[in-house]
Amino acid sequence: MVISLNQNLQDSLSNLLTSTQSQARNVAFNIQFAALQDTVIRRLNAEIVEVENITGRQSQLNRIQQVTDQLNDRRAQVSEFEFLNTSNNQRFSTISTLATNASIALELGDSDPDNLSASEITTYESVLASLVTETNRLVETSDPEFFDGSHATILKSKLEELQALTPTEGTIDEEGSESSTNDNRAILDLLDDIALAAGAAADTTATLNLMADNVIDQIDRKLKKLRIESSEISVEQAVEAEFEVQRLKTEYATFLQAIEIGFDFASQSADRLVEAMDPDNFSSNTVLSLIV
């Protein structure tokens, strides 16, 4: 048995189907559009990363950073050398003073400069202990740009010679005598050598400190110029990158907008076509309007 539907019910079902098809079409488009939008965003983000690392500007920044790192490393080396050199300078001065005072005390410690007394030996041994302490504190420095004359090594060697000699109560041989009665004259001569060597070393280290200060100052000026240059390039890079990023955002936004507008137009056209195919609305004018 066939049940016929009245015209109103047929129209309602037709409208329902048309509405359902339109909604399904919209849902499908929204799902596809959302997926496309995610793809576009990922691609845009990837291109933004590339833009922010503009090859030309970034290579300049990389070069500046490389030079900056090298200068900072060199500055640290020179600063360390200067610190050690300053410490040596103070110790060289102390050693020179101790050796000079010891020499004076041995020869002029009492009323008999030609003989070494027990009290003078005690004074010498006390000074010798101080000399050993200060000399052991000397640090060997090494730098390709600064030559310190190996003063620390020389003084340590002389001190070893001094420690090998034994002061003896009694005669102090005349200076330059060919034969020696004991080690007293050798001790005095070696003390004078140490005083002179330490004094020269103190002068050398003072000069080296001035040279090191000058090198550090030059490095600091170069680093300042590099910081300024890097800052200027970074600003230029940021401006260029921002311009390019905005261009990309506009380009992709326009692309998505075009797709959305195209869908809306196609959807409206489909709705008009369905409406036109309705027998109640079908006419030659409708067909002509669709064709146009």
Image (spheres, rainbow, N blue to C red):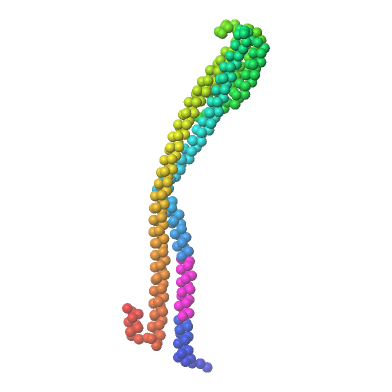
Q: Is residue 209 visible?
A: yes
Q: Is residue 118 above or below residue 44?
A: above
Q: Residue at x 53, y 25 (%)?
A: 89
**Closer-to-camera residue (290/88):** 88
List x then y, in percent, for residue 83.
53, 31
The residue stretch that appears in magenta: 19-36
**Closer-to-camera residue (104/270):** 104
Q: Residue at x 41, y 75 (%)?
A: 267
In the rendered image, the residue lying farthest to the right is 118
Query: Quadrant location of residue 119?
Result: top right
Q: Is residue 158 visible?
A: no
List x then y, in percent, for residue 15.
45, 84
Q: Residue at x 43, y 38 (%)?
A: 222
Magenta span main SS: helix
Q: Is residue 116 above or below residue 259?
A: above
Q: Residue at x 45, y 34 (%)?
A: 217
